[in-house]
Image (cartoon, rainbow, N blue to C red):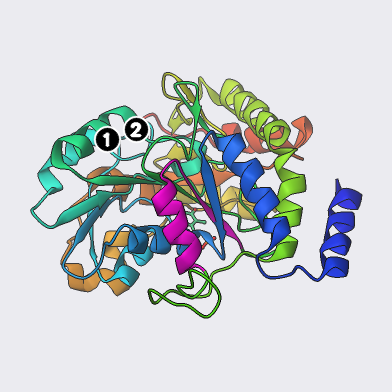
Amino acid sequence: MLEEILGAIRQVIVSGDLAGGSFVEEFEKDFAAYCGTKHAVGVGSGTDALWLTMKAMGIGPGDEVITVPMTFFATAEAITMTGARPVFVDVDSKTYTMDPAAIEGAVTARTKAIIPVHLFGQTAAMQPINEIARRFGLRVIEDASQAHGAGYHGRKAGSLADAGCFSFYPAKNLGAVGEGGAVTTNDGALAEELRCLRNHGQSVKNHHPVVGWNSRMDGIQGAVLKVKLGYLDDSNALRRCHALRYTAEMAFSQGIMTPMEGDNMTHVYHIYALQVAERMRLVEAFREKGIGYGLHYPVPIHLQPAYRELGYLKGAFPVTERCADQLISLPMFPELNTSQIDAVVKIVKSIGFSCKAA
Ligand SMILES: *Cc1c(COP(=O)(O)O)cnc(C)c1O
């Protein structure tokens, strides 16, 4: 794949089609087809994808957007950047994605949209979420930044709501060689508005009907992503295979909870997070043995200093806060091999957690 990628980069540089342009358009066509939507619009990052989608929907000051505090900071940050206010609801304790039962209590006259996050590679419960949105006349935007290729009732992430926002940050399941993002949608007018906003609000050159921003995707990223998209299903299959091995090996261990795949969902394991009440002991063991681990996310967004002004207190979202204290992410990437997985499992099992856990 590396030679193919280097060849694609060379082709872009030689062509001079570097900022937006034909390589981005080709990737957009392929990515829309892959996700099962009519349109895909390449932008500068996943954060921009979220921000510009809300802007294109007319969301701004005075509005509220419902999302979860159990996500990467960018989901809430993009809402704030539109001038709207993020309103949080807790996540489900098994899937770690938006709890549909919590949404209705958070809807006010100012609510304009809901942003469920397909956390760790598994889609949120989109049917009930879309149903509530329909009832209250709200838009739904998928934050699919961790879920390239994830499935829900036979359809792909990005095709399950009004718009799907993706990040191609290098570490994502589909990663660029730098920054990138995209919005998928079946709404032609929304796609058109996004194409305008990402290019300084220009409809045609030097004509600016609205104020936009510079969030074009690089030609190099478009060309590289087009190559890597061809390998996405294979690399997701490897991730699923590794996850299955982790889960099978640890299934009957006391004090830990392995990730759960919901009915009719295809988890693509961007992150394999284990829930362990005594997380510190595992962190220490991993550090000692030199095993890489992650914490996603140790400080929930409603408790971040930047959002003190929103007025949320500790205890507001018990499931999210428990996840912040107890989740630990194990090594997970397509190139992982079984002996590496078994070495990690051996460390987890050697600890002997008490059964009060998880
Ligand atoms: C990575 C990520 C983003 C932001 O994407 P960038 O490309 O880094 O701007 C947004 N939401 C979630 C859930 C993410 O994981």
Q: Are marks 2 and 1 in contact (CB under 8 Å)?
A: yes
Of the residues shown, which amino acid type is indicated by label 2?
Met
Of the residues shown, which amino acid type is indicated by label 1?
Ile
In the drawing, does residue 335 fall left or right of residue 85? right
Give the crowd class for mark 2: few <14, some 14-19, many >=20 residues within 10 Å: many
List the residue tagged with mark 1. Answer: 129
Of residues 319 and 262, the one drawn nearer to the viewer in this rendering: 262
Q: Which residues are magenta?
A: 180-198
Residue at the spot 61% in from the left edge and 29% down from the top edge: 246
Residue 275 within the segment the image draws in magenta: no
Residue 127 location, quadrant: top left
Q: Is residue 63 visible?
A: yes
Of residues 111 and 26, the one drawn nearer to the viewer in this rendering: 26
**Residue 126 circle label:** 2
Of residues 355 and 336, the one drawn nearer to the viewer in this rendering: 336
| Picture layout, residue 46 above or below residue 39 | below
Quarter placement of the N terminus: top right
Per the image, label 1 sits on a secondary structure element best described as helix
Per the image, label 2 sits on a secondary structure element best described as helix
Residue 186 within the segment the image draws in magenta: yes
Q: Is residue 74 visible?
A: no
Give the alpha-carbon distance from disc 2 to disc 1, as whole Å.
5 Å
Give the crowd class for mark 1: few <14, some 14-19, many >=20 residues within 10 Å: many
Residue at the spot 9% in from the left edge and 52% down from the top edge: 108
- In this view, the residue farthest toward the bottom is 206
Label 2 CB less than 8 angstroms from ligand 1: no
Of residues 328 and 270, the one drawn nearer to the viewer in this rendering: 270
The image position of residue 8, as x and y in percent, is 84, 56
Figure label count: 2
| Picture layout, residue 265 above or below residue 319 | above
